[in-house]
Amino acid sequence: MPETDDSSNEIKEFCLDIPAKNSPFFLKGSNALDWGMQNRLARIFSPSSGRTVMLAIDHGYFQGPTSGLERVDVNIVPLAPYADALMLTRGILRTTIPPSTPGGIVLRASGGPSILKELSNEQIAVDIEDAVRLNVAAMAVQVFIGGEYETQSVHNMTRLVDLGNRHGIPILGVTAVGKNMTRDARYFRLACRICAELGAHLVKTYYIPEGFETVTASCPVPVVMAGGKKLPELEALRMAYRAVSEGAAGVDMGRNIFQSNAPAAMIQAVRKVVHEQATPEEAFDLFQSLKAETEALAK
Ligand code: R5P
């Protein structure tokens, strides 16, 4: 216990001319959330740009060792310092990710079927106590609007939202697209809005070239763009640029980063677009120069 001050000599400064600050939280739709929830969101989104570059490496939960994720320790751990958050399963987190890794952890919390079965037949796959134990920044759940197990997947999300609200852990609703579904603005407005209406604190969805701004505008919580299949780097940077210009609060990209032939260069180029509003061409220049440096060092 510290020594008590001698109150007769105390000098106090109450700064009576400075009003107490009452700043709104920086993320859309998140102002009414409790401190712990906001603090966790600030581990995912940069408070200075209001955006995130999340690195998605959770593909193994339904498709095994995807190309680029065969050895997470070798290929992904060196990228982690460039990511604002990692999206992954608890298995990879516990076995392979150093606990000193900076940035938030977005824990994959639904699963069940593999690529050999009906993918929408997911259930909640993590206990909330384990998420608390792992000190995660959010939990992610796949929502299959229009899918065979639509209602079940929505209920997975709403149950996680209730648990997340109880424990201060935000829930990321991930809009999954079934094999036969049209990927258009009408579908993604529907899917994102359902996630937000039913309590998701943030939503992840795909970019579409027509009307993406109506998807972000009609979703009252932050929307992050999913990467999708591997594209040439400049195209992927253009997609990220358009997404953030059209209202996305960042990206959650996987294959377009870890399947690049220079993943560290690519994630830094994506950061340039997302956090510094660089044009895709400027970011691609950075990609090429970082890639050349890495290649020179390897010689
Ligand atoms: C898929 O269900 C997972 O949520 C992936 O994290 C997601 O698809 C993002 O990865 P990618 O950018 O490779 O599409």
Image (cartoon, rainbow, N blue to C red):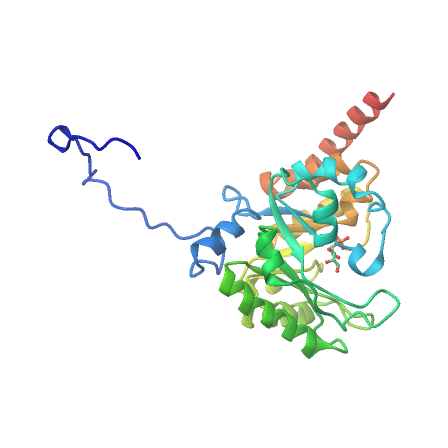
The answer to whether residue 102 is left or right of residue 296 is left
Q: Picture quarter containing residue 150?
A: bottom right
Q: Percent position (x, y) of residue 264?
A: 74, 35
Identify the residue at horizontal 69%, vertical 36% (top origin).
268
Between residue 65 and residue 167, name the one nearer to us. Answer: 167
| Residue 214 appears in the figure | yes
Q: Picture quarter containing residue 176?
A: bottom right
The answer to whether residue 57 is left or right of residue 48 is right
Identify the residue at horizontal 63%, vertical 75% (top origin).
155
Q: Percent position (x, y) of residue 79?
A: 72, 38
Between residue 205 and residue 258, name the one nearer to us. Answer: 258
Q: Percent position (x, y) of residue 286?
A: 71, 31
Which image quarter holds the N terminus? Answer: top left
| Residue 211 appears in the figure | no
Identify the residue at horizontal 42%, vertical 61% (top origin).
32
Q: Residue lying furthest front in this view?
A: 1
Is 137 drawn above or below residue 110 in the view shown?
above
Which image quarter holds the C terminus? Answer: top right
